[in-house]
Amino acid sequence: MPRPPLPIGSYGKITAWRDGSGWLARTKFRDFDGVARLVKRSGKSRAAAERALRAALVERQAPAAESDVTPATKFGKVADLWIADVERAVDAGTRSPGTLDTYRSILRRHVRPALGELRIREVTTPAVDRALSVISKRSVSGARTSKIVISGTMRYAARHGAVTVNPVREVGRIESTPRRQPRSLSADERREWLAAVESSRKARDWDLADLTRMMLATGCRIGECLAIGWADVDLDDATVDVCWRLVRRTGVGLQRMPSTKSGRKGERLIPLPSWAMTMLKRRRLAIGPGVEAVFPDSLGGWRDPSNVRRVWREVQAESEIAGFVTHTLRKTVASFLDDADVSTRKISDQLGHAKVSMTQDRYLGRRLTDRQTADVLENLLGSGGPDDEKSPKSVP
């Protein structure tokens, strides 16, 4: 019966002998391509030669491409390979450029200094737990994102057979202080903000009043609202197809990308209240043909959300509304619909959330003073106009 072959990545008996003034040690190592090869190392003594040989066996890798990963590969290299995977997903449109930028930043600032020089086999659950504990003392949110980066890197290593189990799975929970109550604007604050943007020349130049109305009519993110083109708006059926978003990618510039995972048109078709349609028809007449963006910049192109946020902050700082950012409007819509007894499932669909739990946990404010019960968004700013908040209509 023939002798069974050595397991992949293992070696046989080490033999050593004198070689001139020193010692030579050798053994057979079965590489990852299945071929058993002789490996030799020398030393001044038998023990030194055997130690050198064992160290070489631990580090040994089969001749392979740079992308191959083994237990001896450094974590930092595998992290770079995983980031390259994320970048390819961004190029394919399945991941956000903002996510890629965040992962790169967290890898550079937190993860690489903590684990970058470790071999993949040395990245154990205790090692990851210690690293995240240190990172969380500086930033809890940074530790949470670091956990994602480390887990993604180790999943990449597992796919290449370098580890059998992702050590991040057993890492302890990263605790933080209780989440603050979602911030929503009251009716008085909505009127005050609209008055502020309509009276500010800078805000008028940047269309902040109409952009505010569109965000309140749809509950969309600012990057989604700024990406709306006239081809996405049906002025007859009073709907808008939210299928794009504007994002700035490092080294590339502003990009208009699909806002849904499938990228299909009509997947997130949102009906609009009459006051939003009045605003859109007015803008359609004022902008005229030849410009696709509903909220164009001075050259007729797409506005950069980062620039709009900067102007928004400047105008907001001059108002008396505290703690107000663009995303507050999105949470205002969610809480307003919730107070009108709209189901959480429908609110989640309106906001474009994949999970209802995201809507419930992070977007629904409580104890609002302006409860509405009917024709919900029709009365968000008042059926008579942006400054007239009347009593809600009755539901038939």
Image (cartoon, rainbow, N blue to C red):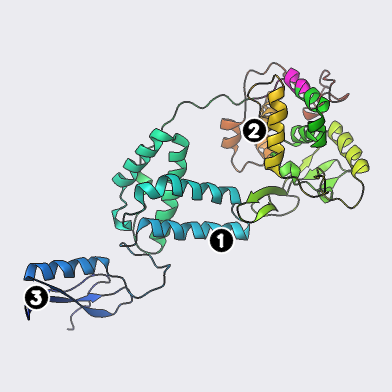
Disc nearer the start of the sequence (2/1): 1
Residue 260 relative to residue 4: left or right: right
The image shows residue 163 at horizontal and vertical percentages of: 34, 59
Vertical placement of residue 173 versus 182, above or below: below
Q: Amino acid at mark 2?
A: Thr
- Residue at image point 45% right, 26% down: 177
User: Which secondary structure, mark 1?
Assistant: helix
Q: Which residues are magenta?
A: 184-192
Q: Nearer the viewer, mark 3 or mark 2?
A: 3
Residue 173 relative to residue 314: left or right: left
Mark number displayed over residue 88 = 1
Q: Which residue position holds label 2?
A: 344
Residue 69 relative to residue 105: left or right: left
Q: Amino acid at mark 1?
A: Arg
Tell me the CA gap for discs 3 and 2.
Answer: 75 Å
Disc nearer the start of the sequence (3/2): 3
Q: Which residue position holds label 3?
A: 23
Vertical placement of residue 102 versus 356, above or below: below
Does the magenta segment cover residue 120? no
Tell me the CA gap for discs 2 and 1.
Answer: 35 Å
The image shows residue 388 at horizontal and vertical percentages of: 85, 20
